[in-house]
Image (cartoon, rainbow, N blue to C red):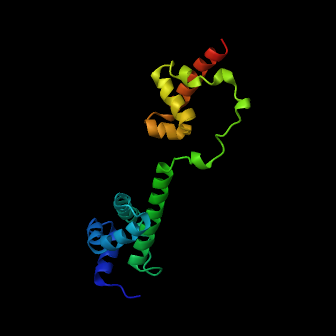
Amino acid sequence: MSITPIEQQIIKYLKTGDQRAINLLCENYSNSLYGVILKITINEEIAQDALQETFVKVWKNASKYDAKKAKLFTWLFRIARNTAIDKLRSFNNRYQKEVQIDTSNVYILPTSNLNQDVLDIREHVEKLEEKYQIVLNALFFEGMTQQEASDELNIPLGTIKSRLKIGLRELKKVYNP
């Protein structure tokens, strides 16, 4: 494996913790790595984040690079590829919360099994304080998990749980006076 003079300089800077390594990496590899990342993520914003995170990982793990095991670009490529995959998974987990109701039979209930006393539950939820309404609507009518509601509403998870508990307690008073 022959190493180019620029690769030798970058490796030297990485091993000594010299900040010039990042500048040289960006100048010589950012376009290629961005292309790899964009091909995986198919999203420019995610790709830009992943590229930046790639360079941070390279900097933090510079001591782990071994020129005997892989060329510098191969090492950079693997870090970029794995970072892009992680970013894409994170993005997909966060933004694919839709439930396919039209193809599901979960919500098809025989009307004979419905408790007529609770059909007006939305009306009773609307009588609660707004902070409880928001949480109950997110959890029960929009189908979010507590963590998803916390993230979506920008409310701490503990507060979501407390408001759920209090909201349910208030609803219970309506149905069990």
- Give the quarter of the image for residue 1: bottom left
Which residue shows up at 53% across the image and 37% down it? 142
Give coordinates of residue 43: x percent, y percent. 38, 61
Q: Is residue 139 left or right of residue 57?
A: right
Q: Is residue 149 visible?
A: yes
Q: Can residue 15 be seen in this view?
A: no
Q: On screen, 177 above or below 131?
A: above
Q: On screen, 1 above or below 162?
A: below
Residue sitting at the far bottom: 2
Q: On screen, 14 above or below 153?
A: below
Residue sitting at the far front: 111
Which residue shows up at 58% across the image and 18% down it? 170
Give coordinates of residue 47: x percent, y percent. 37, 62
- Give the quarter of the image for residue 23: bottom left
- Give the quarter of the image for residue 15: bottom left
Which residue shows up at 47% across the image and 63% down it? 85
Marker count (numbered): 0
Residue sitting at the far top: 177
Q: On screen, 14 above or below 126?
A: below
Give coordinates of residue 177: x percent, y percent. 65, 11
Q: Is residue 29 left or right of residue 144?
A: left
Give coordinates of residue 98: x percent, y percent. 52, 47
* Front residue (pair 154, 173): 173
